[in-house]
Amino acid sequence: MTAATNNPGKGEGQKVGVAILGLGTVGTEVLRLLNEKSEDFERRIGGPVEVVGVAVSDKSKPRPNVNPDLITDDAFSLVQRDDVDLVIEVIGGIDYPRRVVLEALRAGKSVVTANKALVAAHGAELSDAADSSGVDLFFEAAVAAAIPVVGPLRRSLAGDTVNKVVGIVNGTTNFILDAMDSTGADYQEMLAEATRLGYAEADPTSDVEGHDAASKAAILAGLAFHTRVTAADVYCEGISKITAEDIAAAKSADCTIKLLATCERVVDEDGSEAISARVYPALIPRRHPLATVRESFNAVFIEAEAAGRLMFYGNGAGGNPTASAVLGDLVAAARNIVHGGRAPGDSTYANLPILDFGQVRTRYHIDLHVDDRVGVLADVARTFSDNGISLRTVRQEGSDEGARLVIVTHQALEKELEDTVEQLRANDAVLAVNNVIRIEGMDV
Ligand code: HSE
C-alpha cells in the first residue's frame, strides 16, 4: 500500500503522454475517443493528453485512421520512452502483457488495463510493482466493462464491510441462458445463435466453461474482502451441461438459471472468517434482481453491512463500453500524473483464507432418472438423510421407462452433496443423475 516514491506531479497544463498497447476493438475505440474529445479530456485532467505511440503485433496491417508514425511492434521500448507517462494495455492474453506491463510499471509509468485474465493471475505482482514505483494501476474495464464496480468496491465501499458479491459477469453465457429460457431451445442451438450474432467467439470455451467469469470473480473477491485471490482460487463450472429440461424445471419452480460469480464472506460457529469465490450456473428465483438481467447484459449485486443491497447493471462487454471504463481510469491516472499523488494500491490486509469448496453451503436441485418400483423413493431419500441433507421438495413424474425425480434440498455442504451423488450413482435403481444445479438467492 505504501508508495516508495512520492509523485509531485508534472504540473497544471503539462502534457500526459499515452502509449496504447493493442489496437483491436477496444484499443481502436480508446484512440478514437481520445482524439475526438481531446478538449474535454484536457479540461477534466488539467493538461492535454497525447497518444505518443501505439504497439501492435502486425505493423504491416493497414490502419487508415491511425498516424503511421505512432505505430510500433516493439511494446517494450515504447513503454520505456521518456515521453510516455501512462500505458493502456488492451492486448489480452497473460504472459506477454504481464511482461510488458511489469516493464512499464518498473519504468515508472501508470498503467490502465482491461485484461481480467492478467489481473486475476498476476494482480499481486503488478500491484507490488506499481507500489514500488509509486504509480497507478487501474483495471475498471477488467470486470463487466462499462459497469462501475471496481471503483465502487475500491473506493465507495472502502468504509463498509462487504459480505457478498454476486454477479452475472459474462454476457455470452447470459445471452445463451436467457435465450434458452425464452425459447425453450437447447444449449447447442442457442450457442450457435450467440455465435451467429457475434456474442460468442469462434472458440467459446473461456466464456461457456466459466473461465472468463472466474477471472472476474477473483478480482471482485479480492477487492471486496481485502484479500489476494487468484483465478486458481475460484471454483468453476460452466453452462455447457445445462439442458432445455433443466431450464423447464427451473421455470416450473418459478426460477431461472444464470451463470453466477459468487464471492462470499463465510463466518463459522466460532467466529472465524473465510471467503469463497465460485462460478457455476445456478437457479435463482424470478423475483431476484439478477433474474431480470436479460440478453447479454451484466449485473453485479453487492450486500454490505451498512450500505445494504446494491446492484450495478449495464453493458459488460464490447468496444465502446470497455473503452468507457478504460478512459475513466485514464482520466484518474492522468490527473495524478499532472497534479501529483496516486490512488491507494491493493488493500489485502485482511488476508482471509479461501474456504475449501467442499465446505461451501448452498441448496441443490437434483434431477434423477430412477426405476419406478417399490422402495426406490425411500431408498433415494435415505441416501440424502444418511449424508445429513434435508429435503425441501420432491417431485416425481412417471414415464414408460422409469420415473423422473426432481429433488430440492435445504442448505447443505458441497461435500455432503458430492458424497450423496456418488452414492446415488452407485445405486442400481438410479438409472441416471441427469443434473445437479445449485440454487442461490433464495434469501433475497
Ligand atoms: N466475453 C466476455 C463476455 C466479455 O461474453 O461477457 C469479455 O470478458
Image: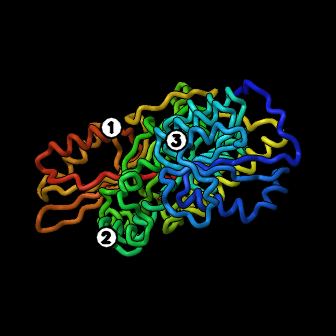
Residue pushed farthest bottom? 183
Vertical relation: 133 (above or below) 97 = above
Marks 2 and 1, Cα distance to the nearest angstrom? Answer: 34 Å
Labels 3 and 2 touching (C-beta < 8 A): no
Q: Which mark is residue 97?
A: 3
Counting residues from the start of the chain, the first of labels 3 and 1 encountered is: 3
Which colour style is shown?
Answer: rainbow
Marks 3 and 1, Cα distance to the nearest angstrom? Answer: 42 Å
Counting residues from the start of the chain, the first of labels 3 and 2 encountered is: 3
- The residue mark sitting in front, 3 or 1, is 3
Q: Quadrant of residue 1?
A: top right
The x, y position of residue 273, in whole percent, is 55, 29
Q: Nearer the viewer, residue 331 or 261?
A: 331
User: Disc 2 designates what residue?
Assistant: 189
Counting residues from the start of the chain, the first of labels 2 and 1 encountered is: 2
Label 2 residue near ligand 1, CB within 8 Å: no
The x, y position of residue 85, in whole percent, is 72, 41
The x, y position of residue 187, in whole percent, is 32, 65
Q: Amino acid at mark 2?
A: Glu
Q: Which mark is residue 416?
A: 1
